[in-house]
């Protein structure tokens, strides 16, 4: 390796290490930090953020990038240069005072959003949303975009994704998905949802959740599970992955499927190339691809009949009081209830993407100026009715439910929907490559799928962009077909409707 490349990688690793330090501070803040530590923690975080920004935009890094440009035949070198350049170019285009302004307005906006949501009064939040949208338009203009402004924001979370492509995919998905949900809702047979709301003692839930996470491959020597108000997973390094959950004694799904979800993220982080850590070749591709991994383990595997054929006897023995007399079929139905609901984070895997389509359409219209901020509540409610057949009673369960906009985060929501589509498409390819994969699950062998994911996705780091990775792994561009097929195949027997 050339001296130039070695110097370059040293700089890149330092930036990655600063990021890891930030993540560790954030994890600590959510899990362990005493209340009065907040002011000091904010100082630590601000310093780390400033140092990271200085390094990302340093003239020295710029010179090293120029010296290395186009020189690499080695795909590892080429990937590290290309991805570092992408972040560098974006960072140097954005004026420092715009970044600072967005940070300060969003910190006020977040506080106001909390109050507005409590009072279910969008009008209180509206002036902040107007200001944040204006700042994000300025940011998009500074970064530049090929198609429309939304591209510049989306690109931060899903590199290379185009708004027009997304709009096309969502337009294809919208009607078949809404029709599928109407069909499920009017089915004669509905599973008994009350089963999952019986009493599941917390200590037993935790032990069982840990057991499931380990069984599907999470290495507790290289990771932890703790408690936080909002569950998350953060990969400090492949050997140090922190995930969190929360426990509700009268809701089985919350912690158990929450842990399977975060374990999906955690397995990706643990599966990254340790030797490439802190460099793009040792990092996840995008938020959407990350979400495909959590969806895979939480829903496609964790809510499958095959999974519970193996785990249900133990589950029933563990929660013997709650599950007395509950058959495997009744159980699989109870954990797979599909029902239109107001709150995105509580939505099931079938209705979920309609919540995202709603947000995407509103965000895009807001950014373009085609929707006035004051009209958001009515636009939101009308779309809920159109897509899910229900209408929020107030702003709290409507347009004020998510924190994202108050943080100035626009263009993030689509990554959740992309994750679901990518996940189903990867699953279709995995089943093609491992025809007996579900029989393996029935015997408790999950390694076979994990190894497939490791080879096809985790170990490749950022070598491919998300759309290229989907093509490389599945042989096809992103499509809604695998997701719709998956839903039909899975829910037809549960609801007694035609597959
Ligand atoms: Zn997730």
Image (cartoon, rainbow, N blue to C red):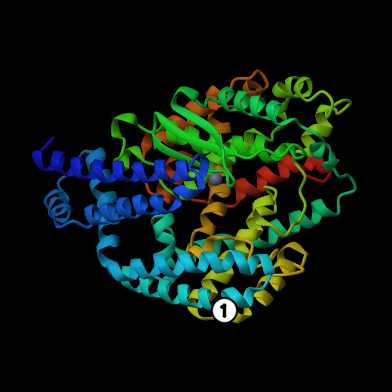
**In terms of image quadrants, where is residue 46?**
bottom left
Would the CB of label 1 be found within 8 Å of ligand 1? no
**Does residue 282 appear left or right of residue 438 in this picture?**
left
Picture quarter with the C terminus: top right
Q: Nearer the viewer, residue 95 or 90?
A: 95
Residue at the (75%, 22%) spot, across then down: 318
Residue occupying image coordinates x 59% and y 20%:
445
Disc 1: which residue: 373
Residue 435 placement: quadrant: top right
Picture residue at 35% right of the left edge, 74% below the top? 141
Q: Secondary structure at mark 1?
A: helix
Task: Please indicate whether residue 154 sits to the left or right of residue 47 in the image.
Answer: right
**Residue 154 position (above or below residue 298):** below
Q: Position of residue 474 (x, y in %)?
A: 49, 41
Residue 144 in view (yes/no): no
* Residue at the top extreme of this rendering: 443
Horizontally, residue 249 falls left or right of residue 274, namely: right
Front residue of 167/42: it is: 42
In the rendered image, residue 396, in percent from the top left (x then y), is placed at 68, 65
476 or 308, which is in the foreground? Answer: 308
């Amino acid at each position: 390796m050339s001296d130039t490349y070695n110097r370059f990688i040293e700089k890149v690793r330092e930036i990655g290490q600063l990021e890891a330090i930030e993540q560790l501070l954030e994890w600590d803040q959510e899990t362990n930090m005493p209340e009065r530590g907040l002011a000091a923690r904010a100082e630590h975080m601000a310093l780390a953020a400033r140092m990271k920004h200085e390094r990302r935009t340093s003239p020295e890094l710029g010179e090293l990038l120029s010296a290395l440009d186009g020189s690499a035949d080695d795909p590892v070198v080429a990937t590290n240069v290309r991805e570092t350049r992408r972040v560098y170019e974006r960072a140097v285009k954005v004026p420092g005072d715009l970044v600072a302004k967005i940070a300060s307005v969003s910190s006020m906006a977040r506080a106001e959003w909390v109050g507005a949501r409590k009072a279910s009064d969008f009008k209180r939040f509206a002036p902040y949303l107007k200001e944040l949208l204006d700042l994000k338009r300025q940011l998009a203009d500074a970064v530049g975009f090929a198609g429309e402004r939304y591209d510049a924001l989306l690109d931060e979370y899903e590199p290379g994704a185009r708004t027009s492509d997304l709009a096309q995919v969502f337009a294809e998905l919208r009607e078949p998905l809404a029709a599928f949900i109407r069909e499920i809702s009017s089915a004669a047979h509905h599973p008994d949802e009350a089963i999952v709301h019986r009493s599941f003692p917390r200590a037993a839930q935790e032990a069982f959740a840990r057991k499931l996470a380990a069984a599907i491959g999470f290495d507790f020597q290289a990771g932890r599970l703790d408690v936080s108000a909002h569950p998350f997973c953060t990969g400090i390094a492949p050997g140090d992955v922190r995930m969190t959950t929360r426990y509700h004694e009268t809701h089985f799904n919350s912690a158990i499927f929450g842990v399977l979800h975060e374990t999906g993220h955690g397995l990706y982080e643990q599966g990254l190339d340790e030797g490439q850590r802190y460099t793009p070749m040792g990092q996840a591709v995008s938020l959407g691809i990350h979400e495909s991994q959590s969806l895979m383990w939480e829903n496609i595997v964790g809510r499958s009949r095959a999974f519970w054929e193996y785990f249900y006897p133990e589950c029933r023995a563990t929660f013997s009081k709650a599950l007395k007399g509950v058959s495997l079929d009744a159980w699989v139905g109870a954990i797979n209830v599909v029902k239109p609901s107001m709150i995105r984070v509580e939505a099931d895997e079938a209705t979920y993407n309609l919540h995202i389509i709603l947000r995407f359409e509103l965000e895009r219209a807001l950014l373009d100026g085609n929707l006035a901020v004051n009209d958001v509540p009515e636009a939101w409610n009308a779309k809920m009715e159109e897509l899910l057949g229900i209408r929020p009673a107030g702003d709290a369960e409507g347009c004020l439910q998510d924190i994202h906009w108050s943080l100035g985060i626009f263009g993030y929501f689509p990554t959740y929907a992309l994750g679901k589509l990518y996940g189903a498409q990867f699953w279709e390819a995995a089943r093609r490559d491992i025809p007996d994969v579900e029989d393996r699950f029935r015997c408790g062998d999950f390694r076979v799928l994990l190894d497939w994911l490791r080879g096809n996705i985790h170990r490749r780091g950022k070598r491919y962009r998300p759309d290229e990775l989907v093509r490389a792994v599945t042989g096809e561009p992103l499509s809604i077909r695998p997701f719709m097929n998956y839903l039909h195949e899975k829910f037809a027997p549960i609801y007694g409707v035609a597959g």
